[in-house]
């Protein structure tokens, strides 16, 4: 049976890279029943809607969602990011953001907690615009949320040859959240005696990722640190044009969402210069999660074979599709 996949191409280069990803999936012979959703900055500017309830309900019933990029300079920061992308992560309980980083010197997967931390939106503003303005921005860390993310990361580490897991945080400054993460990690680790564990402060992890990325196998970290580390790691692994991600509901009780790590890149949108490989690799992660392991492997291999080529967005998509 065809997999029912919601397509949110979104804004900017999202509109250009998603068709290439679908082209490659079709070339791999996978039967997708795609449903296009017009969501993102363009729809918001036209209708004022960010994520209508009826659409959210429809998305809940799908097998997966493939998203290009959302956000546009004409809309104030946060409206689309928070109202659409983060809302989907929260509402669909996509609690793991899985971000592999593979390159000549690096073979690491970041397991980014995806439903809590500073992304939960705790905080507020008072006396805005006055000299006495106050803004607070908290970080939510629940034992439940942290632990389920850690368990996923340990399972993943156990399945990889190196069986190594590094917790990344900032326990020396964020003592409340850091303490919860460290204790939860130590306790979960006890159930995985064959996984070796380490800990790095996030600032040190940035140096290591650049200078000795071979240090890392699985990294597990909170939402914001994971956001920042995976941009850095993506650059180290060969550029953000290659970096893929999966927002997972590991239990499979609803759709997971797959998207390139990069944004909508309004500066190059419409020029045909966007690299579609990150979106194609995200689609490969989707195939894997949909149980199409063989097609996923062929797409991944084809991307590797095409990675050194240059060309326009659609030329690169064609090159991968031919090699599938
Ligand atoms: C990412 C993006 C998002 C994030 C933005 C667009 C909200 O940067 O997926 O890494 O911060 O998580
Ligand atoms: Mn990011």
Image (cartoon, rainbow, N blue to C red):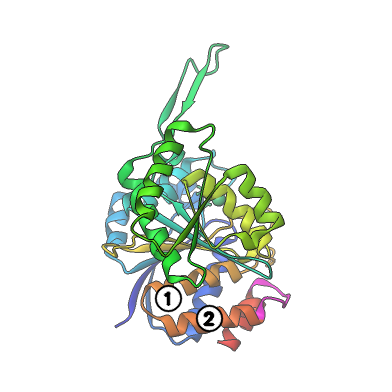
Q: Is residue 15 above or below residue 117?
A: below
User: Residue tagged by mark 1?
Assistant: 287
Does the magenta run of residues contain 21? no
Residue that appears at 40% across and 48% down: 186
SS class, disc 1: helix
Q: Is the stretch drawn in magenta largely helix, strand or loop? A: loop
- Label 2 CA crowd tier, 10 Å (few <14, some 14–19, many 20+): many
User: Residue tagged by mark 2?
Assistant: 299
Give x and y (percent) for residue 130: 55, 13
Task: State which quarter of the image contains the C terminus.
Answer: bottom right
Q: Between 41 and 235, which is closer to the camera in this rendering?
A: 235
Q: Do the residues bearing badges 2 and 1 touch, measured as CB atoms within 8 Å?
A: yes
Magenta extent? 306-313
Residue that appears at 46% across and 84% down: 295
Label whose residue precedes the other's in the sequence (2 or 1): 1
Q: Is residue 290 above or below residue 46?
A: below
Give x and y (percent) for residue 166: 51, 54
Does the magenta run of residues contain 309? yes
Respond yes or no on whether mark 1 lies under 8 Å from ligand 1.
Answer: no
Task: State which quarter of the image contains the N terminus.
Answer: bottom left
User: Does residue 94 appear to the left or right of 242 in the view shown?
Assistant: left
Q: Is residue 50 visible?
A: no
């Amino acid at each position: 049976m065809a997999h029912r996949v919601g397509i949110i191409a979104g804004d900017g280069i999202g509109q250009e890279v998603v068709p290439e990803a679908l082209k490659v999936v079709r070339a791999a012979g996978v039967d997708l029943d795609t449903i296009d959703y017009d969501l993102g900055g363009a729809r918001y500017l036209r209708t004022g809607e960010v994520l209508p309830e009826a659409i959210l309900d429809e998305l809940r019933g799908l097998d997966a969602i493939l998203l290009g990029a959302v956000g546009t300079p004409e809309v104030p920061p946060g409206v689309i990011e928070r109202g659409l992308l983060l809302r989907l992560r929260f509402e669909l309980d996509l609690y793991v953001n899985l971000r592999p980083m593979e390159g000549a010197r690096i073979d690491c997967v970041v397991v980014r907690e995806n439903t809590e931390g500073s992304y939960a939106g705790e905080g507020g503003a008072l006396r805005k615009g006055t000299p006495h303005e106050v803004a607070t921005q908290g970080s939510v860390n629940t034992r439940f949320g942290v632990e389920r993310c850690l368990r996923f990361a340990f399972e993943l580490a156990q399945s990889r040859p190196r069986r190594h897991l590094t917790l990344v945080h900032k326990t020396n400054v964020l003592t409340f959240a850091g303490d919860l993460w460290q204790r939860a990690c130590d306790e979960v680790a006890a159930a995985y005696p064959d996984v070796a564990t380490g800990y790095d402060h996030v600032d040190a992890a940035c140096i290591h990722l650049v200078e000795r990325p071979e240090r890392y196998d699985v990294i597990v970290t909170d939402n914001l640190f994971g956001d920042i580390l995976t941009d850095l790691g993506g650059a180290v692994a060969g550029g953000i044009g290659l970096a893929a991600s999966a927002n997972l509901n590991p239990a499979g009780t609803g759709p997971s969402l797959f998207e390139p790590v990069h944004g909508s890149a309004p500066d190059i949108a419409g020029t045909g210069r966007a690299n579609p490989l990150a979106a194609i690799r995200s689609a490969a992660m989707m195939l894997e999660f949909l149980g199409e392991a063989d097609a996923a492997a062929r797409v991944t291999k084809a991307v590797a074979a095409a990675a050194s080529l240059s060309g326009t967005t659609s030329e690169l998509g064609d090159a991968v599709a031919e090699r599938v």
